[in-house]
Image (cartoon, grey):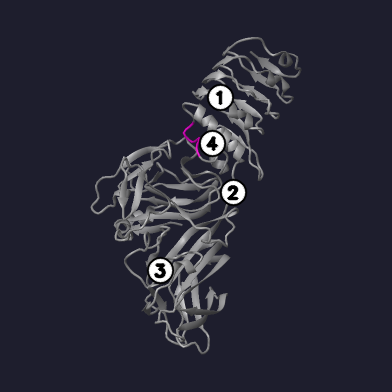
Amino acid sequence: MSLSLFLLSLLTIFNPLHALPPPRGFSINCGSSNQSTVGGVEWITDDGFTTAGNKSTLRTTPGLMPVLSTLRYFPDTFARKYCFVIPVAKGAKYLVRTTYFYGAFDGGDGPPVFDQIVGGTRWSEVNTTENFSKGLTSYYEIVVRALGKTMSVCLARNSRTTSSPFISALELEYLEDSMYNSTDFDAYALSTIARHQFGHEGRIVSYPDDLFNRYWEPFMDNANPIVESHSNVSSDDFWNLPPTMAFQKGLTTSRGKSLNLNWPAMPLPLANYYIALYFQDNRTPSPYSWRVFDVSVNGNKFYTALNVSTVGVVVYGMNWPLSGQTQITLTPKEGSPVGPVINAGEVFQIVPIHGRTRTRDVIAMEELVRSLKNPPSDWSGDPCLPRENSWTGVQCSEGKLIRVISLNLTNYGLSGSLDDNIRNLTAINHIWLGGNKLTGPIPDMRSLNGLVSLHLENNQFEGRIPESLGDLENLREVFLQNNHLQGPVPQNLKNRSGIDIRI
């Protein structure tokens, strides 16, 4: 589910008057050839993060933020995904944000629909059609743990894609360990549905007010009065570290009345959600500045007898099943001196993580990419996942322990060499790389005990045939003809029965 911003609003998010260090992460201006700094946030080019796609600069639009004036698009219809690979701290938690402004870069009538992937998990479908028709940008966010030293964020075509997928900006922001820490990030990610500051209109709160560059959009509700806070809260008092600005205003009711808030405004798809609600008594601190009320979501008890003071408090819930319109109800306890109040809220859809290809296989495949001069354009990101977006020519095992079991790039026009790390693909059964222009020696494959067929014919390999091939008990086909190999066929290979050898 996408969130939207006016074209100019990204300019008004940032407040350059704060002398603070930039967020920890990357702000990538896709398709741009120049770095820029906006309000203390340094936007860098996407060079070095991806080798796929083409750059495009949009026609000049008055007021359009420079970050939205360029994009990267992906016209290759054969590639199974188009990935950005970003260095991260293994085990750390990140907010990933993708931003899209179509701008009719391809001369079409409307933006394409496509999928986005983080790691090996399909994150969501990207559909910016409605927002673009209203002059809005679209952005998507997900909170996810880094499973390795790099994180891939990819786009992919689906059955509804009719033109080239594209992206305007990609951001990764490092999050502290305490943030959203009730979530098992080894098994789940959190996809942002809504993040609002209630009673506000106009400016979006983000960096530097929010050190983690989250977008807190304004949310007005004409049914409930607005109050302003007479004291500040400390972000450090909250696990999720919300910005102080999010508490400056709130929605309330008069004494003895319940507060009903239809939020988020849009209906939600049936799923499980993480909900965080933020409260502060807006009055001047005193022994009497407190409020007590019950919190319910769609009529279900969320928190009982919540005591809200000027210090502020957050309540959250995991795995809440929601569908359609959501209503938050705050019911005051008898004797509470004033009505309930609410200042801000966040809702995330819980996204199951679909696993990751075994690290040993990932490293071996990445080394193979580096040894080839012209690998397939989709050889980036997770080699196996999502399964419908595995690398071209790569087949993988089923189950939780995902391994590479087959490699077939016959007659693909490859050049370069076959990296020694191929020996670490210990679950592989078939290596078919015939009909290319591969050079150098055939590496030692003694550890590939499950190898059934090896097709390296019609290349430019040199040197001797490895004796280790004769020790592979499951090997049934060895095709090495039409290369520049020297020396005799290893005796242990010649003596094997039940094997088709062509040299």
Residue range highlighted in magenta: 376-380
Q: Which residue is mark 4?
A: 391
Name the spot of residue 428 as percent of width and height, x first: 65, 31
Q: Is residue 226 above or below residue 81?
A: below
Residue 324 seen anywhere in this rendered image of the structure: no
Closest to the camera, between mark 2 and mark 3, is 3
* Residue 379 painted magenta: yes
Q: Are marks 1 and 4 in contact (CB under 8 Å)?
A: no
Mark 3 and mark 1: Cα distance apart in space: 56 Å
- The amino acid type, in three-letter code, at marker 1 is Leu
Closest to the camera, between mark 4 and mark 3, is 3
Name the spot of residue 381 as percent of width and height, x first: 51, 40
- The amino acid type, in three-letter code, at marker 2 is His
Residue 395, picture quadrant: top right
Closest to the camera, between mark 1 and mark 4, is 1
| First of labels 1, 2 by sequence position | 2
Q: Secondary structure at mark 3?
A: helix
Q: Which residue is mark 1?
A: 418
Report crowding for label 2: few under 14, some 14 to 19, many 20 or more residues within 10 A (C-alpha): some
Name of the residue lying farthest toward the bottom: 335
Which one is in front, 416 or 175? Answer: 175
Q: Is residue 133 above or below residue 472?
A: below
Which one is in front, 271 or 148? Answer: 148
| First of labels 2, 3 by sequence position | 3
Q: Which mark is residue 244?
A: 3
Q: Which mark is residue 354?
A: 2
